[in-house]
Amino acid sequence: MSAPHVAALFKPFKIKSLELQNRIVMAPMTRTFSPGGVPGDNVAAYYRRRAEGEVGLILSEGTVIDRPASKNHPDIPFFHGKAALEGWAHVIEEVHAAGGKMGPQIWHTGSTSHPTTDWRPPSPVESPSGLVGPGEPRGNAMTDEDIADTIAAFARAAADAKRLGFDVVEIHGAHGYLIDQFFWAGSNKRTDHFGGATLKERARFAAEVVKAVRNAVGPDFPVLLRVSQWKQQDYSYRLAETPGEMADWLVPLAEAGVDIFHASQRRFWEPEFPQIDGDEGLNFAGWAKKLTGAATISVGSVGLSGEFLAAFGGESSQPESLDKLVRRLEREEFDLIAVGRALLNDPLWIRKVRDGDTQNLKSFSPAAMLELA
């Protein structure tokens, strides 16, 4: 039994073929511990430890699709090719053996660079218009053939996820990477079907990716899409300033086949549209659920005092009350909550929360990001 004040976190959840023991998701976190793009036994053991710690759903670090310049760090794992897929088969075997559920996050980094390395892929990076941000050229603008091949590569990766035995698949459409670069007017200057003056028009590429993924996995396999307003190129940027604009963005993606929106914001407790009265201060995931009718995952600085971006600046964080989170779950503002650094730091975080063992919750140090514990 869970402690009464956190009981909402430990209710089962079901959608399509997915059944979870609780509402806690391990957030995808880039780890760069897969030399040559192949996840090894250490990666499998890392995820198994979180399954043993009773994470409801584990989402992998970003794993890149089969495009020549899909990653921006040499040790980000592939989700294609014999060796990498064999590595991921071992990961899901270990997670299932420990009673866990898991999905890979499939990804294309677009024209972004990685903050910790000068490494460059062997082929030129690509993006909708050869830009990494407003007025900042980097790499090649994608041709029609590039776009078609990229959509097909997302679908192949999703099909491989299902074939290997994963429980869901998540498409990375956030944080200024390729799919998000199509959403963003600052990086998408195309004049064809995949561009346009409106967010609804610029969402067509993502919709085509989702449709292809849905066709590859069938109707009962859950498809998740991670989205964000902010970008690593501009932390304050907002794609949708009104609920109407957000509906234009997300509703077509739900219609294309998204089952769960993973709505990324920097602080989960902040209202998405504070200027609107009567919405009880819904956050991003709350508005995504309200507008689309889809299930949602909220995320953003859960369980720790400092926000996650501060960790990249070397800041530590202390355990934080979960009261705000529990209240939002109790009123069903969103369905699931993703936890990042707290689980990165401590595979047993969920058990401690469930059992009320708050005195043994660990502080977070950025040093944790440098090891696969």
Image (cartoon, rainbow, N blue to C red):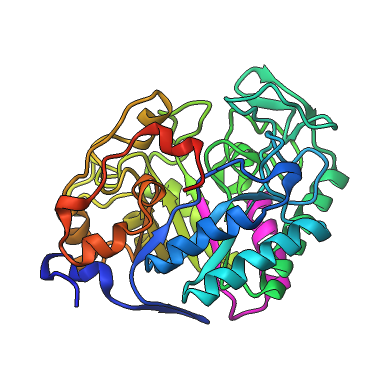
Which of these two is toward me, 52 or 145?
Answer: 52
Instruction: Using residue 305 as the reference point, say whether residue 294 is left or right of it.
Output: right
**Front residue (pair 104, 184):** 104
43 left or right of 208? left
Chain part drawn in magenta: 204-226
Nearest the eye: 261 or 22: 22
Q: Which residue is drawn at the image coordinates 37% and 68% (left, top)?
A: 54
Q: Quadrant of residue 14?
A: bottom left
Whether residue 293 can be seen here: no
- The residue positioned 68% from the left and 48% from the top of the image is 77
Q: Is residue 153 above or below residue 371?
A: below
Residue 220 colored magenta? Answer: yes
Q: Is residue 154 visible?
A: yes
Q: Residue at x 62, y 43 (%)?
A: 33
Classify 134 as above or below 142.
Answer: above
Asked if the magenta segment contains residue 263, the reply would be no
Q: Quadrant of residue 364?
A: top left
Q: Position of residue 118 (x, y in %)?
A: 69, 21
State the quadrant of the N terminus.
bottom left
- Return the x and y of residue 320 as percentages of the image width and height: 19, 45
Residue 220 placed where, x, y %? 58, 81
Percent x, y of residue 285: 36, 55
Residue positioned most to the left = 4
Instruction: Name which residue lies at 66% across and 43% down.
Output: 76
Q: Main secondary structure of the magenta part?
A: helix
